[in-house]
Image (tube, rainbow, N blue to C red):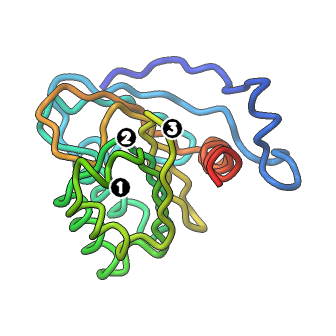
Amino acid sequence: MIRLPYDQITSSVTASLEPPGGAEGLETAIDAYAVSQHPSLPEIAGLVDMGKAVSFYSDGRWSQHDLLTWLLKVTGPACVHIVSWAMTEQPVRQLLNLKNAGQITHLAGVFNPRVEHRNPNAYQLATTTFDSLQFYESHSKLLIIENDTWALAVVSSQNFSNNPRLETGVIMGDRATAIFYRNLLTTKIK
């Protein structure tokens, strides 16, 4: 593991997407960690904490839905928001299992409209698995995990599909960042 300095996260864009009542009292300065070598999902999940950012890569060994499963082991039951350009059936089944096990308390998703035609089985299963499912022309890949104690925002190159390629991302344990991305979803995608 390499510890890197990380300046306070601020942006003029953040002001337009502030949480209701403003961002006062929400922490936006976080420590950053980058994993090295070939990190396993348990190793990555073990680095996650509030006030930290963990940069990762998968090298095709695991996918976004696998990361979600491990992050929920850290956070406990949580509300999950997913944005992905693509989705396949096996990851949706994994989400359904996590929901049925009580690990996901609310599941919201935003996917590219072409999912319906590219993966009709995944689309059909998603319509009954997600509590809120919307379609929007986006290439973003986001994962937001929130409960009373935890607020994680994962920004990565990974879709909700099995992908044998190199994928990268960062997990941010920061409530203001999670709110920023959640508010982006609710203001841009209606």
Camera-nearest label, 1 or 2: 2
- Residue 112 at x, y = what percent? 41, 44
Residue lying at 67% horizontally and 27% vertically, measured from the top left:
9
Q: In the image, what residue type sits under mark 2?
A: Trp
Q: Point out the tag, 3 or 1, that comes first from the N-terminus.
A: 3
- Vertical comparison of 24 with 1: above or below: below
Disc 2 target residue: 85
Residue lying at 70% horizontally and 42% vertically, measured from the top left:
27
Q: Quadrant of the N terminus?
A: top left
Secondary structure found at label 1: helix
Q: Using a 10 Å C-alpha cutoff, classify the residue at mark 2 as few (fewer than 14 neighbours), some (14 to 19) or many (20 or more).
A: many
Residue lying at 66% horizontally and 53% vertically, measured from the top left:
186
Camera-nearest label, 3 or 2: 2
Nearer the observer, 48 or 77:
77
Residue lying at 47% horizontally and 68% vertically, measured from the top left:
78
- Residue 4 at x, y = what percent? 46, 18
Q: Residue furthest right?
A: 21
Left or right: 75 in relation to 91: right
Nearer the observer, 96 or 53:
96
Disc 3 target residue: 52
Secondary structure found at label 3: strand
- Vertical comparison of 108 with 183: above or below: below
Secondary structure found at label 2: loop
Q: Using a 10 Å C-alpha cutoff, classify the residue at mark 1 as few (fewer than 14 neighbours), some (14 to 19) or many (20 or more).
A: many
Q: Place residue 147 in its image quadrant.
A: bottom right
Q: In the image, what residue type sits under mark 1?
A: Leu
Camera-nearest label, 3 or 1: 1
Q: Using a 10 Å C-alpha cutoff, classify the residue at mark 3 as few (fewer than 14 neighbours), some (14 to 19) or many (20 or more).
A: some
- Residue 107 at x, y = what percent? 45, 67
Q: Of the numbered discs in the image, which one, if any, rests on residue 71?
A: 1
Q: In the image, what residue type sits under mark 3?
A: Lys
Q: Point out the tag, 3 or 2, that comes first from the N-terminus.
A: 3
